[in-house]
Structure formats: structure tokens, C-alpha cells
Image (cartoon, helix red, strand yellow):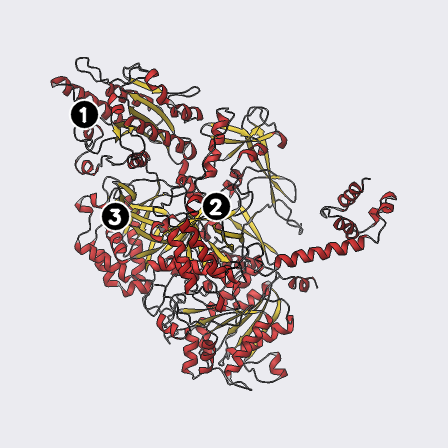
Amino acid sequence: MIISLLSYSGKQEALLLLLDVGPSMHSVLPETEKVCSMLVQKKLMYNKYDEVGIVLFGTKETDNDLTKEVGGYQHVVVLRNIKVVDGDLVEVLQELPRGTNDGDFLDAIIIGMDLLIKKYGETNKGKKRLCLITNALCPVKDPYEGTKEDQVTTIAKQMTVHGMKMESIVVRCLTGDSKNRTVQFHFMGLFETRNISPVTIFKGDLEISSKLRIKVRVYKKTSEEKLPTLKKYSDKAPPSDITATHEVKVDYEYKSIEDHGKVVPPDQRIKGYRYGPQIVPISSAEWDAVKFKPEKGVKLLGFTDSSNILRHYYMKDVNIFLAEPGNTRAIAAVSSLARAMKEMNKVAIVRCVWRQGQSNVVVGVLTPNVSEKDNIPDSFYFNVLPFAEDVREFQFPSFSNFPASWQPNEQQQEAADNLVKMLDLTLPGKGEALQPDFTPNPVLQRFYHHLELKSKHPDSAVPPLDETLKKITEPDVELLGKNKSVIDSFRRCFELKENPKIKKSRRLLREKMSGSIDRESNADISAQPLPFERVASLNRNQSCSMISSSHLCKFCQEKNLNGFCQYLVSKDLTLISKIEAIDSEVTDDEARSFLVKSETKVE
Amino acid sequence: MDLDPDDIFRDDEDDPDSEVFQERDSSKEFVVYLIDASPKMFSVTCPAGDQKDETHFHIALDCVSQSLKTQVINRSYDEVAICFFNTREKKNLQDLNGVFVFNVAEREYLDRPTARLIKEFDMIEESFAKNIGSQYGIISGTRENSLYNALWVAQALLRKGSAKTIDKRILLFTNEDDPFGSIKGATKLDMTRTTLQRAKDAEDLGISIELLPLSRPDEEFNVSLFYADLIGLEGEDLAQFIPSAGNKLEDMKDQLRKRMFTKRIVKRITFAIVGGLSIELNTYALIRPTLPGVITWLDSVTNRPLKTERTFICADTGALVQESSKRFHPYKNKNITFSMEELAEIKRVSKGHLRLLGFKPLSCLKDYHNLKPSTFVYPTDEEVIGSTCIFIALHRSMLQLKRFAVAFYGSSSRPQLVALIAQDEIIRSGGQIEPPGMHLIYLPYSDDIRHVEENFLEPNFSTTQATDDQIKKAAAVIKRIDLKDFSVCQFANPTLQRHYSVLQALALEEDEIPEIKDETVPDEEGMARPGVVRALEEFKNSVYGENYNEESDLAGDGKSTDTSRKRKTISENAAKESSNYDWGELADSGKLKDLTVMELKYYLTAHNLPVSGKKEALISRILTHMGK
């Protein structure tokens, strides 16, 4: 009872995992298991009242309500109906059954929606999410009534009505060889594994001048996700005490240095601020009276060439400036400035005091973020810039002043050019590797993995870093293998030797050098990559647009499913081009050809 | 509870900033400013454009004063001494002629800078002629040698502390490139020799002597006449030495100021490139936020600092415990414990410092790929010969091909992906604006990136994008409000400036706190220029329409009206409910306590009183309001 009450309070998310377990998916099911159990683990930590259900498709068996009610919907199993997350769920997800039949993802989507509708009706809007993982290799069957496009239209409409979101991962294998395969990427970066509500930093006017204001909201765009804060553990309670909290309380006492052990009560303490060797005592009230008190507000100082702001001056995590939602005038104002700035290569310098009573001023730079998608408004990224006090202007010798022996010769320069050119992380056909947006934090992954192990066996050792995560911390053996000649010639061109005057580093250096040679030469170069595409999240909450993957579309074309594609086009949808997908064979031009309206190219 | 924030953060073993800030106290520096006060320093001026010309002496004082003010904010543990030579009066422990050590009360000659030192040094020029006086101290026939004396005094001042842990420097400001020019023959040779020997002795003691020459555009400071030998410049170093020959006063000050810094290395790292080639790099923190100093708790009676003691108490037994080496987290209704070693092992995901993973075009680095200040890297051949050559080759290729390197940085606090961006050297008006090297940008993981914009999809997409006309009008505004020579660090932080001006005034027991100028406010005057106003007006009409009135703009979602309407309904309802009770009677008979909190709140809401607090608080609030 309590739980169901909570789930309607608006904070809790209902998530339905739609997992393709058909034969063609078997090779990637270990990855599916990892991403899904991680998702549930994070919920157990941060959102433990969230509800999750699992629908499998491509199974041998059939077990779902709709098949009983109306028939059809073969090979779709509701493995677990929607309920509050628990430890069992993690285990269920870690041992997904292997299916024997081809799965129909449209069937699975319909079953998923049916479960959500039966459970919530039209309540819990915007907190209902479907996550689909499939390779979309198996043909979609013809519906009983109407055409496939009708079916897709109906699905999209229903999603809108019920306020459901959908995210999909479409897996694609480049080779048919299922042995000897290492997975190039975790799915991990692809899913939003933890739902964090947007943190509002500021709500108010962006003052272009005293006479022109634009209503904006400022949110965090990046923020470091740290390991969860662990509590200090006390083992003092007897093992028999099952109600023991094992917590440790920390007490602070302020003692006089001269008078040993004499505790000074809070009302006899005063804050002292350092000024060189002096400490100046000031009470909080006095300090409040004299300290710098700027007015809340965000004011434009002016525009400048983007080349005036070098990238390394960005100081902190990044904010995003959005026009007030629903305010069409503000949206147009932000959009016109952003587009003009982008055209002219300009950035805006702004002075910000986010809150009333805040004692510091922030000067930062707004850079245009021109939206690639029609239903996402243009916005600005905001980065903090340094003040004069924050910069240390050290001088370093010009490279041209170094002795000739330190200057690379022509041959060396050519070897370096080749290395920089060939050791390329954005190879055609493979998309951009290690894109921050899709690269999970290996430390967090490993922590959650260890946490789960410990929940079963408290003495479990720290697990080794997952092979797929090593793709983040170590060079890609395939890339190295492909460029062996470039690397060899680079190595031949340059000579490193330890400075004979310094002994201590000699041993260290040799160790380092031999170590890395071994690792690379022993590596299995035959490993094949397995890229994935991210199908951007579909937000059914406010609009009924759908963004799909190039592959899904191509697949539809090949299978003569023009209806699906046309539906996408008619809804003014974008294909995911290389810019945002890890792997997409669709070039920018092709992607745009699907659009009614052309977009500006990013590069 | 008030806690010392410093103490709390120190306890956090996961603090990712610890590495960023630790360099601050890693090394201490002792500096003696040796300022030439000869008549030539007063006679030679530097043209300052539209302002009055300034003497070299004034420029030197200005630089030292600026440096002291920066130091008290950034590096207040460093110690300084200020010493003039070629003076009429003398003041030094050795009682040598022509050398005057400037100091203030309650301070050793070589000591940390105090508020008083900064203040009195700022006013020194007014009384300089009277109290110290300028007089060239190398006179033929007397064998007096003020430069020799100055070096001796400076060296003696720097005797304290070990050169192993402390950076000892003498910074010498002069515009005389040939100090023994007026002396002839054997005497000159002899004086030159003894002075050089004195300098060499100092360097043997681990003291570095740095020259900050001032010269006029038409008469360059010739370092090879004498000073090259004094500061030990040879061959290539001599060629590299750029005499500070800025044409403009501001440039000259700028260059002197930059030279006064010592470069502090955060740490030396190994950069594994490919095929077992690993080069050595030094990392520098060129950009870090400067924060107001830490708070120290004092006894308000004695104004003496207090000691903070932390005790750990077991919440179950109340027993005092040692700082625990175990941490735990509830998970699946169990407490999962981790040892500190396990947590450290979890973070150890990479061997070595920095490993190259590949290269990408610069356009792949987005504006939101940022988390914290960048770190500068510069090659060193000190341990591995050949490092610099490889670095320069890659640096050139990356600049030419417009690519950045992606590498994994295995730091112990937060191992993460980094972008290495090659930065070409930028020299403007004779000074280095950007040093050559690479900047290490810390990249976010997908876990750190939020997709906020996707939460606010617009249902009506035709309206999200501006029209061509609106963009044209916006472009006109951008052209009008252009900050041409904007440089990133041109503003002083008004909060810090205010903070330290308050502290300085209080430390000196002055009544008035000097006003500081907030340089970050918009240029109202510039914004009021007719051209700007017109462009803004046109842009406004284009996006907001002709008859737009901001005050009545509830174009939003009307939420504000919704909430106010809701509030009104609640208070009306409360007033109605409230009228059902005889409050006076209830209060007199002491029956208020028999009512529910909900009922009590009817009264409070109806009378516009706060509804927070416990039942007793509500009752007493009602009684107070009724005057009972």
C-alpha cells in the first residue's frame, strides 16, 4: 500500500525493459545483462522506490496478457511484471534466457505499453519509460488490421496520450563471426542509467541591456558523478545486535591552545580570516555588513570573436542556458542570437550572480548550441572564465630556441604527422570512438560490480576491470594492429635514452618500456569490434515525434517497409548521423536527405 | 552546527580537487627584491601614451607592489625582503654602504608580507628622497661597490632555511647595463671580478639571481656587457634572454610581472605514446580558482586561534573509536562494507600516468566537454633525453592537422579521459601571451553529462527556430556590442578584492574600508550609444513584436497566476473554516490544545500568519496574535 502510494507521488519512475533474446542477439546478451543489471543496481542505490518490469521477445515460449485476450503476440514473454526494484531483479537480469525464435520488436513495444497502461492508466505521466534493446534484424510481421504504418502511428499516438518515453539501443554486428569477438563498447554510456532531475541554477532574465531582457533558465549540463558517499563503519556493536546501525558520529570540539583541554563554547568563538601572517577576527554579522553583495542577475557584457576565448580557459563544469519553456518569444530571441553567433563565429561574455545573497560574481562565456533537431530549441552552453587572480602567467621557452638536437628533422616530423593522422579515433564506418557522451566511467562500473558481488559474498575481492572497459583505459589493439607500420616507423625515427646524470629513473624507465611492448605485441589483433548505435530517446510527453536510427530506417527500406520510413519523414524526423551515433553509415548528406528541412553541418 | 569547512573537506578522501590545490603549499619561496635606486633609475622615463611618463624606479616599485598584493592572496607563506641599493642612507645588518633594507614594524627583514608592509611600501615614493635618498654607489677612487654590497646583504638575508626545501631567489631590477662603466683599468677588472665572485658564492648556496632589466626603446639593455656573467648566461641561454624592451609602459610592466613568477611544477608525469615510447612531461597549474583564505576559529575573548579536535563516536555503543578504516553502504537491505584498500583498488583502472589512445579532429571537442580547470604540460629532457623532440613533433602535427589527442590519465583521485590540445606560442608586443605546449582538458563521462534540453521538447516545432530576419537583427546587435580586445583574465574578481580590502583595513585598524571598483559590470555608457540602442530596438521588435510590454508578459505557462490563484483559494477556504470556531472562547478556556493542527492552521492562514512549527508553537502564535 505504502509503495503504491509512493509510486504515484510523482517522483518514482516506471521502467519497462524490452529485451530481444532471439538467436541473433545471443552474442551480445552478456552486454545486455550488464547494462540492465547496472541500471537496476543504480536504482537500488538512488531510486529504490522505482518500479521495473521485463519483457523478453524472441523467446521459445509465449506468455503475455494480450495473447490470451486477443491472440497473436507469439514469442513474447513478460518475465516480470512492473514492481518495485529488489535484489532478485538484478539476478534475474544477470541470467537472461536465450531465445530460439525471431523476435518482433513492435509486438514487444505494444506488450510493454499494454502493461504500463493497465497499471497506471493515464497517471504517472512523463515517468513511464520503455527501454528497447534489439538488433532489429528480424522482420516485423504484418499487423492483423491495417498497415504497419498505421500501427506505428497508433503506437506514437498512444505514447503521447499516456506520457511515455522510449529509448532504444540498436545493436549491430559488423561481422558474422561470433567467436573471438570482443565488444568494442559497453552499452553503458547509451542509457540514462540514473534519472536525475534537472538542477536549476537560475530562473530569470538574461539582460542584453537595461531595455532588452530574455527569460531564461539555467541548468547543469555536466556535473561529476562521484562514487556514492560511504559511511564510516563501526564494528563496536556486538554481532548479535541486529538493529545496530554501525554508524560513526563525528564530534567537533574547539579547544584553546594555551589552556589545554579547555573547550570553548560556540558563542565564545569568532571567525578569523587570514591576511598574510595575520588573522583578522570578524563576527559573521560584521562580515555580512561589509562583504561584497552583488545583485542577482545575468547581464551581457558584450560579444567577442570566439578565437579570443581559448578552450583551456574553461574553468568548471558546464551549464546550459535555455529559453523559458513554452515562451515562444524567449525561444525565438535565444534562437536568433545563437544562430547569428554561430554564423559570425562570436561568443557572448556574461556576468552572472545566480542567487540573491550570493557573494561572488561569475564571468563566463556563452557559446551557441544550435539544435540539430527541430523539436529541441536552440540554447547556449555556459562556461566559467578565470579572473585575473586565477591565472598564473608563467613564461616558457619557445620551441624554436631549443638546440638543434631537440628539433625534429624532416623524417621525424613526417612520422609524427602519420601517427597523428592514422591513429584516428573517428574512422569512417566506425564513427567516433570514446565520445564522452557514450563512454561510461570505468571506476563507477567497477564499484557497482563489486558491490553486487559483495552483496552475495561479503569477502569478494575487487573484480578485475571488465574487458570492455579496458577499451577506455588502454589503446585499442585493433587500431594499433592496423597501423603497425606507422607505429614502427615512428618508433624507429625517435630515440629515447635516460639521462645518465640521473640514476634513479633508469630502472623505472626500462620497466615501463618493456612492459608496454609486451602488452601490445601479445594482444589479440584479430579481435573484432562490435559497434552500437544509440537511438536517441523518444520523448512522448509533449510531442509525437520520433527519432530513429539510420539502421532501423535502412532496415525498413531493405525489407520494403517504406511505410515506417515515410512515417518518420512525415513527422519531420532526423536520422542519426555520424555526429551523434557511435556507428552509422549514413553520412550527413544522406541523413539530411531524409529531412524536409536542411540543417547546418557541424564540421 | 558550525564546522570548519577546511577540516571537513580535508577528511574527504574522494575529493577530486585535492590534487588541483595541493601544489599550493608544496614549496616555499624566499625572495629578495633588489631595486636599483641610482639617479639613472629616476632620470630615465618610459612613455606611457596619453598618461604621464613614468620613471623606471616607479615601474619597479609598481611591479613589486603588485607582486606583494598577489602574494598575500595566493602564497602568503612565502617570505620577502625589499632592498634598495645605490642609496644615500644605509640600513642593513652588515652596515654596508649604499644598501637600504626597507621594513615595517613587527616584521623581520625577510618575513611574510603583512598589511602594513604593503601599505607603507605603496607610499614609499613620497618619502624616498628624504628618508633613503638616491646616490650612485660605485665611484672611481673610493673602491666603494654598492652592487657587491647589495648582493652580500641579499645573500645574508637568504641564509635562513634550507635551500633543499625552499626556493631562494634574488630579483634584481636595474636599468644600468654597465655598472662599472665609469671605472677604468685594473680597478674595474678587480671590482668586476669580486662582484662576480660574490654572485657565484650566492648561487653555490642555492640562491638564484634573476635579472629584470629595464630599458628604453632607443637604448637596449645590453646584457652581455656585464650581467650575462653575473647571472650565468652562456651560449644558447644568452641568445634566449629577451631584454624587456616593450615599447609601451603597460607591456613592460606586464613582462616584468610575468618574469617575477617562478614556475611551479605540479608534478612530473610519464606519457606513454606508442610502441613502448614514453616521454616525460612536467605539468603546471596555470589556471586555478583563487579562493578567499581559509577560516580559522578564534577565541573571541583572547583572539587566539583555537584547536579543532575531532572525535569519532560509535553510534550504537557510544564508545569512542579510532578513525575507521572501513566504509559501508546500505544495499539490498544489507550493509556492504569496503576497506580503504579495496576502494583504492577499485580506482586503480590504469597502469602508468598518461596513455595515448588516439587522435580526433578538434571539432569533436564540444563546449560542454569540461569539468574542471585544465592543466598545462611542457616536455622535459631532464630524465629521458629525446622527450622534447617527440613532443615538438607531435605538437606540430596536431596544430597542422587540427587534431587533439585523447589519452587516459590514471590519477589516483579520479582516473579519466583527457583531451590534449596543442597550443602554439602566441607573442604580442614582444611578450609571450600563450606559452607553447599542450593543455590537458578533463573530459566528462556519459555519467557526468545531462540531457536537460531533451526534457523541454517544444510541441510546436515551427516556432523553435528564429526566422532569417530575426537572425539578421541579432547579427546587427552582435556587431554593435563587440568587445574587440577582450582578453580572458582582464577582470579582477570583485569578491576577492573586496575581501582583501576589508581585511587590510581591519588589519591596519583603519576606520574606512576603501571602495573597490567592480570591473565586471556592463558598460552602461557604451550600451546607451544611439547605434547600439537602435540595433537593440530593432532586434526587440523583430522577436517580441511592436507592442510588447515586458511587465504583462506572462507568455510563459501562466504558472505564476495559477499559483497565486491557488493560494487565494486556500486562504479563502481557511477564512471560511476559521469562522466556524469561537477562537476567543477556545483560547480563554484553554481548549486550543484539544484542536487538531489542521484546525489551528485555519486560524493562522486566515490571519496571514506563518503555519510552521510544532503544535505548541502554533498555539502560542495564535495567543500572541489575539493579544492573550
The crowding category of the residue bearing disc 3, from other C-alpha atoms within 10 Å (few below 14, some 14 to 19, many at least 20), is many
Q: Report how far apart the C-alphas of labels 1 and 3 lie in the structure.
A: 39 Å
Of all residues, the one furthest to the left in this rendering is B185
Chain letter, disc 3 residue = B
The disc placed on residue A192 is: none
Where residue A480 appears, as percent x and y from the top left, is 30, 62
Chain letter, disc 2 residue = B
Q: Secondary structure at mark 3?
A: helix
Can see residue B215? yes
**Earlier sequence position, callout 3 versus callout 2:** 2
**Earlier sequence position, callout 1 versus callout 3:** 1
Q: Amino acid at mark 3?
A: Ser
The disc placed on residue B15 is: 2
Task: Tell me how many marks there are.
Answer: 3
The crowding category of the residue bearing disc 2, from other C-alpha atoms within 10 Å (few below 14, some 14 to 19, many at least 20), is some
Where residue B413 appears, as percent x and y from the top left, is 44, 48
The crowding category of the residue bearing disc 1, from other C-alpha atoms within 10 Å (few below 14, some 14 to 19, many at least 20), is some
Report the side of A217 relative to B218 (left or right): right
Q: Report how far apart the C-alphas of labels 2 and 1 lie in the structure.
A: 54 Å
Q: Secondary structure at mark 1?
A: loop
Q: Which residue is mark 3?
A: B387
- Determine the residue positioned at 78% across, 44% down: B622
Q: Are marks 2 and 1 in contact (CB under 8 Å)?
A: no
Q: Report how far apart the C-alphas of labels 3 and 2 lie in the structure.
A: 32 Å
Q: Which residue is mark 1?
A: B178
Q: Is residue A536 above or below residue A102?
A: above
